[in-house]
Image: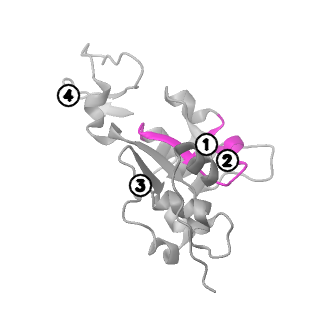
Amino acid sequence: MKVTCPHCKRRIHIGQSRKNVCACGKLLNYRHFLHEKIAYDVYLVDANILIYAFESSSVRRKYCQAILAMHAPSMSIATTRQIIEEVGSVIEQQLPEALLIYHVSTIPSDLTEIKTNFFKQPSIADLSLVQAAYEHPEVRGIITYDKDFARIATAGLVERKSSVKFWLGNAKQFVEKHRIRIKEVEEEG
């Protein structure tokens, strides 16, 4: 995370698990710059989670809805503005108010230049999730059904920038990991 030193006004990159000393010699406290943001863990959701949550014929619907309806004091769900634009305005109107939306203004060239030897290349929306994970240390993982996401977008990139083990999985794995109760949707008959 980049911060401004309150003593000399230099911009400096500080990390969670290291001694952060500015060029002016002042020791900077990592948690001081986060304020209350780090009080909970944030998990980013990909566009496919949002789509499946509102698609009536999807077998993954119950897991995706459980994630969006989750109310846990130590955990929050978020996405990026690029993901919201990708899913469209119909789904955007149905999203819960508790969903955090990160604004990723620019995606650095080292991310946009990621090339794989697979057919699928990362989209701007996928890269916005990785950039949000870079910029916000409270982000602990990404929930997605995109099987290539681990190879394309995260592949250790986020873990290299932070000291925390970064989680990547689908909605079912997330629900099982955190023991989230699923409300059974009554079928209309």
* Residue holding disc 2: 149
In the image, 19 versus 53, the foreground residue is 53
- Residue 121 lies, in percent from the top left, at 72, 51
| Label 1: few (<14), some (14–19) or many (≥20) C-alpha neighbours in 10 Å | some
Q: Could you say which disc has been placed on residue 103 in the image?
A: 3
Q: Considering only order in the chain, which callout, 1 or 2, is on the residue closer to the N terminus?
A: 2
Q: CA distance from mark 4 to mark 1?
A: 36 Å
Q: Indicate which label's residue lies in the foreground, 3 or 4.
A: 3
Residue at x 26%, y 16% (from the top left corner): 27
Segment colored magenta: 136-155
| Quadrant housing the N terminus | top left
Q: Nearer the viewer, mark 4 or mark 1?
A: 1
Confirm whether residue 104 shows in the render: no
Real-space CA distance between mark 1 and mark 3, rounded to the nearest whole angstrom: 21 Å
Tell whether 182 sits left or right of 102. Answer: right
**Residue hosting label 1:** 168
| Kind of residue indicated by mark 4 | Pro
Q: Which mark is residue 105?
A: none
**Nearest to viewer (mark 1 / mark 3):** 1
Label 4 belongs to which residue? 6
Q: Secondary structure at mark 4?
A: loop
Which is closer to the viewer, label 3 or label 2? Answer: 2
Q: Identify the mark nearer the N-term, 4 or 2.
A: 4
